[in-house]
Image (cartoon, rainbow, N blue to C red):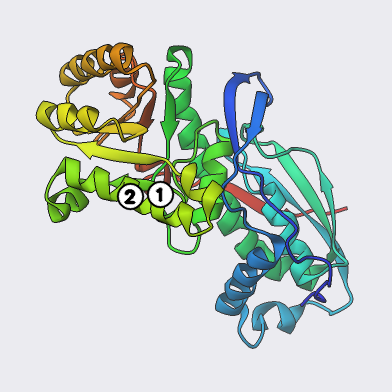
């Protein structure tokens, strides 16, 4: 496989992006006002560790099918052909996969991440040893099909609420080992990333509340924890760490508001009617408190109901289906016959 390069440490591969607006044209997504998100980014070294695992899983001691019938020095070309309609994602990852396996391979790129694609579109061509192309094929397709499926799903959800000012969020319901890639795909599709993991935001869920002895106890302890960590030297990180609380009813909303601690309230499994009522209560509290409270709807929200929730005036709608119930985008990596 490819030679390791010495200059890959701490080079950011991904810039997880939030998109204020997206405009769809016949050929591509035009991204307006991208803003870098400051979560931990997967660098090339971390990605290469994943790629090594993927190839070990697939090839082990050799691709004996290809080795048995393809001369080792024979050169060729394959092209990535799109076979479905959706949003393309994973091109930048594909470049790293190709380079890792065989640095001598060369990509001729026609489409970029975020392009709106249709059957027959060619995203890129790769030139190199045919043995390399054949062994790269499945690993690269597995990643690109899944990332494109996530991006397409995120785009479908966000496009339904684009005019409301509400944003669709992903969740931690991701494929183990692929979280950064799936969350990158959500951003490519026009969605927003919620927290990346348990380390970058405090989200007090129902079990936290129950174990802590109620809303007030959970929020107070979370605030005190952040203040303690900030005093110990991690000042900027913990002073800026958001605290979100999940509520199950109107009494819990009032109790959360009374503490004046959370940055965001998550309405869990509220109906649209109850969501509208909850939003009114929280917006009225904002006037007396003199600050904004972010509101997130969550729980069982589907492609058919997301607009109903967005129209209630919430800031965010989180949808686990973006990363756990997407359909991979069909594509193939076909030999080019000159």
Q: Nearer the viewer, residue 238 or 332?
A: 238
Residue shown at 18%/48% (left/top)?
A: 209
Quarter of the picture containing the N terminus is bottom right
Residue that protrudes farthest toward the bottom in the picture: 61
Rate crowding at label 1 as few (under 14), some (14 to 19) or many (20 or more) other CA atoms within 10 Å: some
Could you say which quadrant of the image residue 114 lies in?
top right
Q: Is residue 41 left or right of residue 177?
A: right
Secondary structure at badge 2 equals helix
Tell me if mark 2 has few (under 14), some (14-19) or many (20+) residues whose alpha carbon lies within 10 angstroms of its own.
few
| 308 to the left or right of 255 | right
**Under tag 1, what secondary structure?**
helix
- Residue 173 rendering spot, x and y as whole percentages: 36, 51
- Is 113 situated above or below 43? above
Contact, mark 2 vs mark 1 (Cβ under 8 Å): yes
Decide if residue 95 is on the left or right side of residue 157.
right
Counting from the top left corner in percent of width and height, residue 131 is at: 77, 73
> x, y percentage for residue 172?
39, 51
Q: How many marks?
A: 2
Vertical position of residue 25 compared to residue 213: above or below: above
- Gap in angstroms between the C-alphas marked 2 and 1: 5 Å
Residue 194 in sight? yes
- The location of residue 161, given as percent across then percent down, is 42, 19
Question: What residue is shown with label 1?
Answer: 227
Viewer-closest of 271 and 133: 271
Identify the residue at image location x=64%, y=48%.
90
From the viewer's side, name the closer residue of 117 and 42: 42
Which residue, given by chain and number where applicable, does mark 2 sit on?
224
């Amino acid at each position: 496989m490819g030679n390791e390069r010495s200059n890959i440490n701490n080079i950011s591969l991904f810039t997880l992006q939030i998109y204020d607006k997206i405009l769809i044209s016949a050929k591509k997504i035009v991204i307006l006002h991208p803003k870098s998100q400051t979560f931990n980014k997967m660098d090339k070294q971390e990605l290469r560790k994943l790629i090594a695992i993927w190839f070990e899983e697939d090839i082990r001691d050799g691709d004996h099918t290809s080795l048995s019938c393809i001369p080792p020095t024979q050169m060729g070309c394959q092209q990535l052909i799109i076979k479905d309609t959706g949003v393309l994602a994973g091109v930048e990852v594909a470049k790293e996969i190709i380079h890792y396996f065989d640095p001598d391979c060369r990509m001729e790129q026609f489409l970029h991440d975020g392009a709106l694609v249709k059957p027959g579109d060619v995203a890129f061509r790769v030139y190199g040893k045919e043995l390399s192309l054949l062994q790269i094929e499945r690993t690269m397709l597995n990643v690109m099909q899944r990332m494109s499926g996530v991006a397409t799903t995120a785009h479908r959800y966000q496009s339904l609420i684009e005019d409301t000012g509400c944003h669709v969020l992903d969740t931690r319901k991701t494929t183990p080992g692929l979280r950064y890639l799936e969350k990158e795909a959500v951003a490519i599709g026009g969605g927003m990333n919620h927290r990346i993991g348990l380390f970058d935001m405090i989200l007090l869920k129902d079990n936290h509340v129950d174990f802590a002895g109620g809303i007030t106890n959970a929020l107070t302890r979370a605030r005190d924890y952040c203040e303690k960590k900030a005093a110990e030297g991690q000042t900027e990180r913990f002073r800026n760490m958001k605290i979100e609380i999940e509520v199950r009813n109107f009494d819990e909303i009032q109790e959360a508001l009374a503490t004046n601690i959370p940055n965001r309230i998550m309405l869990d499994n509220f109906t649209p009617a109850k969501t509208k009522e909850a939003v009114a209560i929280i917006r009225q509290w904002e006037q007396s408190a003199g600050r904004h409270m972010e509101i997130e709807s969550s729980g069982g929200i589907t492609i058919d109901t997301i607009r109903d929730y967005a129209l209630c005036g919430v800031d965010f709608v989180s949808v686990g289906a973006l990363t756990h119930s997407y359909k991979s985008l069909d594509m193939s990596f076909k030999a080019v016959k000159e």
